[in-house]
Structures are given as C-alpha cells and as structure tokens.
Image (spheres, grey):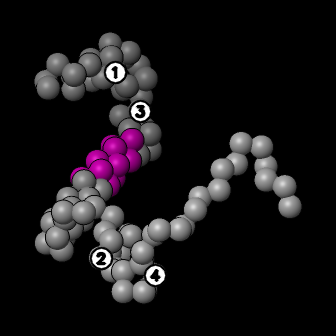
C-alpha cells in the first residue's frame, strides 16, 4: 500500500516501556507521566482548580439564564426595557463602569 502524500511514519524503535507494560500517559501508569514533576498531590490540586473554574462558569451561566428568563417572560419588565432604550443602554454600560 502506498503512503498518502505528506505522511511520515513514526518509528517506535528505541522506546522502552515501563516494566514491559503499556504506558498510559494520561492516567500516569508506569514511570512515564503526562506532566513529569507533578506528584499525585499536585495533580489533585490541578483537578481541584479545574472543578473550581467550571463551577464558577456554571454559576455565571445559570445566573445569566435566570436574568434573561425574567426579562423575557415578565411582561412589565419586558415592556419597561422595550419602551425606554436609554434605560436599556444604561443597564448595558453599568457593568463596564463598575469594574
């Protein structure tokens, strides 16, 4: 079979496996690790940070959805913002001024 144009094969000669077992870099099985120098405790810190970031992101997304639902589904609020574009513009600019 002919190799596709631009394809370069990767040779596995000279690569030793840890203890004769397959190396799973993502799970850290064997001597090879995905991030050499990170111990188990540091890995737990990294996963804790990732959970924290996704938790904050989820809370922001939920809050945005709730506020949008109140504005769209509550007719008095919807009429107020539709009737006064100045108030709508002010409410859009306030977050940038307050930060």
- SS state under label 1: helix
User: Residue 64: within the magenta?
Assistant: yes
Q: Which residue is drawn at the image coordinates 42% and 75% (left, top)?
A: 16
| Residue 48 in view, yes or no | no
Question: Which tag is nearer the camera, tag 3 or tag 1?
Answer: 1
> What span is colored magenta in the figure?
56-68
Label 1 sits on residue: 88
Please say if 31 is above or below 46: below
Residue 31, label in figure: 2
| Whole-percent x, y for residue 71 in the image | 38, 38
Indicate which disc, 3 or 1, sits on the residue closer to the N terminus.
3
Please identify the quarter of the rendering in which residue 5 is found: top right
Residue of label 4: 22
Mark 2: few, some, or many residues within 10 Å (few <14, many ≥20)?
few
Residue 59: percent from the left, percent from the top?
27, 54
Q: Residues within 10 Å of mark 4 (few under 14, many from 20)?
A: few
55 sits left or right of 19 in the view: left
């Amino acid at each position: 079979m002919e190799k596709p144009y631009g394809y370069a094969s990767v040779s596995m000669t000279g690569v030793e496996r840890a203890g004769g077992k397959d190396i799973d870099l993502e799970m850290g099985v064997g001597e090879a690790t995905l991030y050499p120098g990170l111990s188990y405790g540091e890995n737990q810190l990294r996963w804790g940070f990732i959970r924290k970031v996704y938790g904050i992101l989820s809370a922001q997304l939920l809050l945005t959805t709730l506020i949008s639902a109140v504005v769209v589904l509550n007719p008095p609020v919807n009429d107020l913002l539709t009737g006064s574009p100045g108030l709508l513009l002010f409410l859009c600019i306030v977050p940038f001024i307050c930060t």
